[in-house]
Image (spheres, helix red, strand yellow):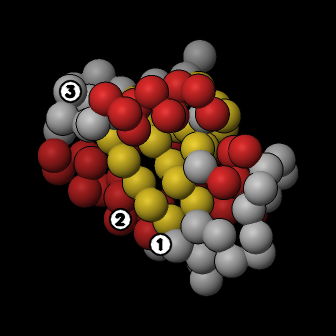
Amino acid sequence: MQDYVLSKIREIGAKFEIEKVILFGSRARGDHSKTSDYDIAILGKDISLADQALLREAIEEINTLKKLDVVFIDEDLEDELVENIRKEGVVIYEQI
C-alpha cells in the first residue's frame, strides 16, 4: 500500500504525535477506483479542537487531486461508523 498520499499522512501522524491513523472505505478494502477519495480516521487521546483543525489542514494541504475525508475517533463519532472503521480499517500509522 505504498502511496504518496499515505506516506504524507504517516509523516503528519508522526509530527502531531497521535496514536493511530487508519485508512478505511474503498481504499482499505481494495475496491477503489482511480478517482476514489481517501477516508482517514485519526485516534488520539484528548486531541483539542485546535489540534484537530491543524491536523485537518495539514492533511488537506497534501498535493493530490483526490478528496481526503478525515474523521476523529471520539465519543461524538457515530457507533456505526466506528464499527465500520474497526472492521475494514487498515492502520497506516501507529505511535510506538
Mark 2: which amino acid? Glu
- For the residues marked 2 and 3, what is the alpha-carbon distance in whole angstroms? 22 Å
Is residue 30 visible to the viewer in this orientation of the structure?
A: yes
Q: Is residue 77 left or right of residue 14?
A: left
Mark 1: which amino acid? Glu
Find disc 2 in the rendering and name its residue.
Answer: 57
Which residue lies at the image location 36% right of the left edge and 47% below the top edge?
Answer: 71
Identify the secondary structure beneath mark 1: loop
Rendered location of residue 70, percent (x, y): 41, 54
Of all residues shown, which one is farthest toward the right?
2
Rendered location of residue 53, percent (x, y): 25, 56
The answer to the question of whether label 2 and label 3 lie on touching residues, with beta carbons closer than 8 A, is no
Mark 3: which amino acid? Glu
Which residue lies at the image location 59% right of the left edge and 27% below the top edge?
Answer: 87
Q: Nearer the viewer, mark 2 or mark 3?
A: 3
Find disc 1 in the rendering and name its residue.
Answer: 61
* Camera-nearest residue between 44 and 75: 75
Q: Quadrant of the C terminus?
A: top right
Which residue lies at the image location 20% right of the left edge and 27% below the top edge?
Answer: 75
Identify the secondary structure beneath mark 3: loop
Which mark sits nearer the N-terminus, 2 or 3? 2
Find disc 3 in the rendering and name its residue.
Answer: 75
Q: Nearer the viewer, mark 3 or mark 1?
A: 3
Tell me if residue 55 comes above or below residue 41 in the rendering.
Answer: below
The answer to the question of whether label 2 and label 1 lie on touching residues, with beta carbons closer than 8 A, is yes
